Amino acid sequence: MSVGKIHSNEIITLPEPVRDGSMSVEKTLETRRSLRNFSQENLTMEQVGQMLWAAQGITDTRRKFRTAPSAGATFPLDIYLVSGNVEDLEPGVYRYNPESHSISKTMDGDRRDNLYSSALRQGAVRQAPASIIIAAEFQRTTSAYGERGRQYVYMEVGHAGQNIHLQAEALRLGTVVIGAFDEKNVGRVLGLPKETIALYIMPFGKPR
Ligand SMILES: Cc1cc2nc3c(=O)[nH]c(=O)nc-3n(C[C@H](O)[C@H](O)[C@H](O)COP(=O)(O)O)c2cc1C
């Protein structure tokens, strides 16, 4: 398997998300803290699927509405997974498909080192078993709202980021929102389409 090869036809259905966990939202708000030191323990597909669902899962199948609010339901966010140590999942870059709660591989190989180099060498990115990247195609929102739509996209990424943070807490995992990175390099490392801009990197895993 060559590192960095673009790949596009594999679709992996994720385990059904849990919709009624054991920790209250108040407790997750109380205990949430940024985590930057991760155990090397593998993540499971259940944990990965749950985190992706919290980011952008469909919660209203009729209208296709999602876990996070979206200006005019324009849904500019795309969620990517950089997998390193996940049970039953090859290292690679995957794109989350909210409608089918599945992931599609977009690139082969462990990209964590490259991502770390693009994120000012922040150790959390190299150490975590996986990272979620929240990216956006601004045009989906600016075509409805003009320039103001750009601000809406930045607001929206905060909603998705907090969902991921609280979900991590409920799973007894941890994460941190990383905004300090070179967006062009991150785009190259992940093979993002040119109209798609990375906004947050969220490494996640068990606390060390
Ligand atoms: C827009 C934004 C960008 C951030 N970028 C980084 C980052 O690049 N690296 C990092 O370690 N933490 C980053 N953080 C996390 C903050 O450092 C963290 O939330 C803050 O220290 C408060 O700690 P807490 O999250 O545990 O409450 C960022 C937070 C926000 C909201």
Image (cartoon, rainbow, N blue to C red):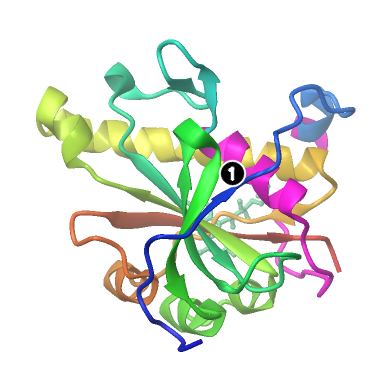
* Residue at the far right in the pictured view: 22
User: In the image, residue 158 lies at what x, y percent?
Assistant: 47, 38
Query: In percent of the image, x 69 and y 77: which residue is there?
Result: 127
Q: Quadrant of the C terminus?
A: bottom right
Query: In percent of the image, x 46 and y 83: which residue is there?
Result: 114
Q: Is residue 30 magenta?
A: yes
Q: Is residue 7 left or right of residue 55?
A: left
Q: Is residue 107 magenta?
A: no
User: In the image, residue 141 lies at what x, y percent?
Assistant: 21, 31
User: In the image, residue 95 lies at what x, y percent?
Assistant: 45, 54
Q: Is residue 114 above or below residue 63?
A: below
Q: Is residue 159 left or right of residue 150?
A: right
Query: In percent of the image, x 30 and y 75: which residue is there?
Result: 188
Residue 179 in which image quadrant = bottom left
Query: In percent of the image, x 61 and y 35: which residue is there?
Result: 54
Mark 1 crowd level (few <14, some 14–19, many ≥20, 10 Å Cα):
many
User: In the image, residue 59 lies at what x, y percent?
Assistant: 55, 20
Ligand 1, seen in the image, is in the quarter at bottom right
Q: Is residue 195 visible?
A: yes
Q: Is residue 162 visible?
A: no
- Amino acid carrying label 1: it is Leu
Q: Which residues are magenta?
A: 29-56
According to the image, label 1 marks what residue?
A: 52
